[in-house]
């Protein structure tokens, strides 16, 4: 195994990439920062969905519920309760996780395709409820008060230090938060999957009956993943809508924007692998740039690529790459220590 | 007090009574063999003991505690480890990881102690060389060994072994018997369903015969094998 070589190399490459990404608002035009904000938030959504579907076997089509609830509660925190938007992001994430509790109660009685449809229906109910929230504009939605992001935590400081406009400083702060969220999500996923719970989760995915018979509780583990990914998705949704600054039920609970594209990203990148969503989001961004001028053709091409990958490369692009090269920057495998291996083979 | 006790356990699938009022006690550290023709309800009995199937009637006691309403997961934690007749590996995980899951969950072994614990079992079951192999790619005989090894990794007080000796060469069978004897010597109670009688009878202290879901006889192996009824029903079919 090239493990001892590839690990330090991938760590160094990863840190260099991270440094470059941190520097983006300092060196690149504002449009690039905004674009990359979109890429990073899509990545966070994709990592959360991949954790659910790829590792816990919970194929949810209702993740827009958590994006929408995260967004709405962030708006409520700012407009109704007078909080800082960044604190509002946390409120949004917690609200999404809280909503996941009753949602799990219903959805976990369904399996496979029924679970998928069930989550979609619940998400749509959440959209309809958001439309009834009169204090936040009901069906037509509402906007963040003027100047909200200008006074947001950290923004005046960044504005002074970098000597840029308030709007640019707000973009930089939200961008760094999205980057932070993506890094935390990636590290947390890795640590979780390497843990006892992660091992149990993979056992459940492979064989539920046998997993129960070796003492694994499938319901408890799946619930833990469902709640944690609801939290991550809610945080991300709230952050996205700080940058958009306007929320409506249709935009915040869009199945196309917050679930369909996310599924596409994970499937082309490689479902059930940690680097899959990263690869997927890069490819998605490139396609978007190349095909942006062609309108509907763009969606048709995306669909065809998705179908081709599902038919001919089930492990996605990352699966193809790693099968050819054996490179794996996030090895999830547990290996016995060498001295125990020697001892055991002598028995 | 017996470690495991079944009281009049019954189970039907539709009109077919696959387990018919089976009662027996298993003493602490005892080894019990179960024989019977195909379809006699042997594997179903294991499913009832391990909690994979709920009985229609009757009770299962572990250490005098009624576990009839407990799930398979709870019974595993309480000390019942099992193998499956048709191997059920965690196919995407390696052999070592299969054991690690069992040890960390059912066996409640700490992360610190688990590697040594699992590798020791892999050594004893002859799977140490396969530790890093993906279990879904193993040939059948190694999958069966993995069933035994994974059941051992749940650190059971009662281990249920379902036809793990079939298809082995004489030498391999000998090794398997030595392994099971060692488990027995460490004080683990064993129930072993097996068609390979010479292997089974060299380990167990008592033998039970199942036929059409009913317990036909239970007792000392030589006496059971000598019984005309058993010779007719069981050996008569084999001959």
Image (spheres, coloured by chain):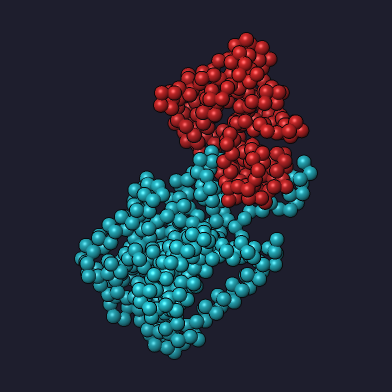
Chain colours: A cyan, B red
The C terminus of chain B lies in quadrant = top right
B97, B145: nearer the viewer: B145
- Work out which residue is located at the far right of the displayed protein and give it: A346
The N terminus of chain B lies in quadrant = top right
Would residue B110 be seen by someone viewing this image from the given angle? Answer: no
A214, B65: nearer the viewer: A214
A215, B134: nearer the viewer: B134
Q: Position of residue B108 (x, y in %)?
A: 58, 42
* Residue at left offset 60%, top offset 23%: B34
Q: Position of residue B60 (x, y in %)?
A: 49, 26
Q: Quadrant of residue A232?
A: bottom left
Would residue A42 be seen by someone viewing this image from the given angle? Answer: yes
* Residue at left offset 57%, top offset 46%: B90
Relative to A287, residue A256 above or below? above
* Residue at left offset 59%, top offset 74%: A15
Relative to A47, residue B128 above or below? above
Q: Position of residue B84 (x, y in %)?
A: 57, 35
* Residue at left offset 57%, top offset 76%: A17
Q: Quadrant of residue A303?
A: bottom left
Residue B116 is left or right of residue B68, and the answer is right
């Amino acid at each position: 195994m090239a493990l001892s070589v590839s690990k330090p190399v991938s760590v160094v490459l990863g840190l260099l990439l991270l440094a470059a990404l941190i520097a983006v608002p300092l060196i690149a035009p504002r449009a690039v920062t905004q674009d990359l904000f979109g890429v990073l938030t899509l990545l966070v959504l994709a990592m959360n969905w991949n954790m659910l579907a790829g590792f816990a076997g919970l194929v949810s089509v209702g993740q827009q519920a958590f994006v929408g609830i995260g967004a709405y509660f962030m708006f409520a925190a700012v407009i109704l309760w007078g909080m800082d938007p960044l604190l509002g992001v946390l409120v949004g994430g917690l609200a999404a996780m809280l909503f996941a509790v009753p949602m799990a109660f219903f959805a976990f009685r369904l399996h496979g395709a029924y679970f998928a449809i069930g989550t979609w229906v619940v998400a749509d109910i959440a959209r309809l409820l958001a439309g009834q929230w009169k204090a936040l504009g009901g069906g037509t939605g509402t906007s963040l008060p003027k100047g909200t992001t200008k006074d947001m935590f950290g923004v005046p400081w960044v504005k002074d230090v970098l000597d840029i406009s308030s709007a640019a400083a707000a973009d930089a702060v939200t961008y760094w938060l999205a980057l932070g969220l993506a890094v935390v999500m990636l590290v947390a996923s890795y640590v979780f999957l390497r843990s006892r719970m992660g091992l149990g989760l993979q056992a459940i995915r492979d064989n539920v009956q046998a997993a129960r018979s070796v003492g694994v509780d499938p319901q408890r583990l799946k619930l833990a993943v469902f709640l944690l990914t609801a939290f991550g998705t809610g945080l991300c949704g709230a952050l996205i809508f700080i940058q958009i600054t306007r929320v409506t039920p249709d935009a915040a609970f869009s199945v196309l924007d917050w679930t369909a594209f996310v599924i596409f990203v994970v499937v082309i990148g490689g479902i059930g692998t940690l680097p899959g969503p990263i690869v997927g989001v890069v490819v998605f961004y490139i396609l978007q740039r190349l095909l942006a001028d062609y309108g509907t053709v763009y969606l048709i091409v995306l669909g065809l690529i998705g179908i081709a990958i599902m038919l001919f490369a089930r492990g996605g692009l990352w699966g193809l790459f790693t099968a050819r090269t054996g490179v794996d920057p996030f090895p999830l495998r547990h290996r016995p220590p060498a001295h125990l291996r020697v001892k055991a083979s002598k028995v | 007090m017996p470690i495991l006790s079944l009281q009049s356990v019954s189970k039907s699938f539709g009109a077919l009574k696959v387990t018919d009022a089976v009662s027996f006690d298993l003493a602490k550290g005892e080894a019990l063999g179960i024989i019977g023709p195909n379809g006699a309800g042997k594997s179903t009995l294991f499913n009832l003991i391990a909690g994979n199937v709920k009985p229609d009637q009757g009770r299962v006691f572990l250490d005098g505690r009624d576990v009839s309403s407990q799930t398979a997961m709870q019974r595993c934690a309480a000390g019942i480890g099992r193998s499956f007749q048709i191997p059920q590996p965690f196919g995407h995980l390696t052999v070592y990881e299969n054991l690690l899951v069992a040890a960390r969950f059912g066996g409640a072994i700490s992360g610190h102690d688990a590697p040594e614990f699992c590798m020791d079992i892999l050594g004893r079951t002859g799977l140490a060389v396969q530790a890093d192999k993906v279990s879904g790619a193993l040939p059948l005989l190694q999958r069966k060994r993995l069933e035994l090894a994974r059941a051992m990794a749940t650190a059971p007080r009662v281990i249920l072994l379902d036809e793990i000796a079939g298809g082995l060469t004489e030498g391999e069978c000998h090794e398997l018997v030595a392994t099971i004897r060692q488990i027995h010597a460490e004080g683990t109670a064993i129930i072993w369903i097996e068609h390979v009688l010479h292997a089974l009878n060299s380990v167990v202290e008592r033998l039970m015969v199942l036929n059409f879901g009913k317990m036909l006889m239970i007792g000392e192996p030589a006496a059971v094998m000598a019984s005309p009824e058993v010779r007719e029903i069981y050996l008569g079919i084999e001959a």
